[in-house]
Amino acid sequence: MSIVDFKDKRIWIMGASSGIGQALARELAARGARLVLSARSVEPLDALKAELGQGEVVPCDVSDPESLDDARGEILTHGPLDAMIITAALYDPGRVDEIERDAARKLLEVNLLGTLWFAQAAPGLLREGGQLVIFGSVAGIFGLPKGQLYSASKAAVINLVESLRVEYAPQIDVRLISPGFVKTRLTEKNDFAMPFVIEADEAARRIADGLAKDRFETHFPRRLTWQLKLLKRLPYALSLRLTKRMGG
């Protein structure tokens, strides 16, 4: 069930302190939504609440199930949600032989396990027909060099969301968001020219528009996403030759 009109809809955004999550909070607030703002850091959430003139600030570390349980309890004191959105993610590009084990473990805890814990909380938090919105990435469509762990985590998330779409239906409307390159503090780490890169505000507008439609996946920019979806369908002899060029 799409949310055609966001006015007075109560929406929880996990990862609202920066990047796409913060931009999406601004976009949904402009469309009349009532927001619950979460991230590990309180200060940027308080600043965003002051900027928007509304919002419940609920600090939460999505990779910590106990922290998530505490947030769930606090949110329920004000009633059920119309939508839950998780944008929180870590990204640490580099060659596979340069990956630090502690950083790899934390990335998977946030990107994959954090998404799972967040999704598990949905049945007790969402009203009937509410939306559970999970961020994959175009990086999860096909394994890309120098972003292998991030790509792998997002591929797993996409697979998880596909399962949840069936398991949670029809009580919960599960949605997948697959952004391409968006200007954020995470993509600032890239040392290559990002094709079809867009601003976070534009990404937020496209996401909100997608959630207002009856479709499982919202992916953008399509000039990039369709290319990667095609790459996935090609024989490995060809697709791996193409991605080898990306790795220099």
Image (cartoon, helix red, strand yellow):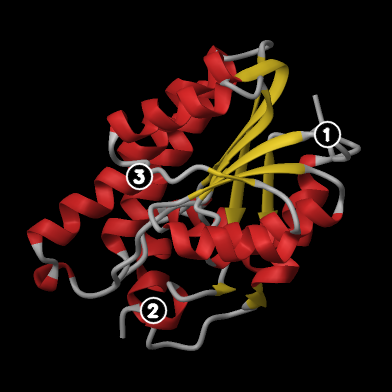
On screen, residue 129 versus residue 162, left or right, reads right
Residue labelled with disc 3: 61
First-in-chain label (1 vs 2): 1
Q: Residue at x 65, y 70 (%)?
A: 200
- Which corner quadrant holds the N terminus? top right
What amino acid does circle 3 point to?
A: Asp
Residue labelled with disc 2: 246
What amino acid does circle 2 point to?
A: Met
Q: Position of residue 98 (x, y in %)?
A: 11, 73
Decide: is 123 above or below 72: above
What crowding class fits label 1: few (fewer than 14 Cα within 10 Å), some (14-19), or many (20 or more)?
some
What amino acid does circle 1 point to?
A: Ile
> For numbered disc 2, what is the local secondary structure?
helix
Cα separation, mark 1 vs mark 2, equals 38 Å
Q: Nearer the viewer, mark 1 or mark 3?
A: 3
Residue labelled with disc 1: 3
What crowding class fits label 3: few (fewer than 14 Cα within 10 Å), some (14-19), or many (20 or more)?
some
Q: Please count the marks in the image.
A: 3
On screen, residue 86 versus residue 114, left or right, reads right
Q: Position of residue 23 (x, y in %)?
A: 66, 64
> For numbered disc 1, what is the local secondary structure?
loop
First-in-chain label (2 vs 3): 3
Q: Residue at x 63, y 67 (%)?
A: 224
Q: Residue at x 52, y 74 (%)?
A: 184
Labelled pair 1, 2 in contact (Cβ < 8 Å):
no
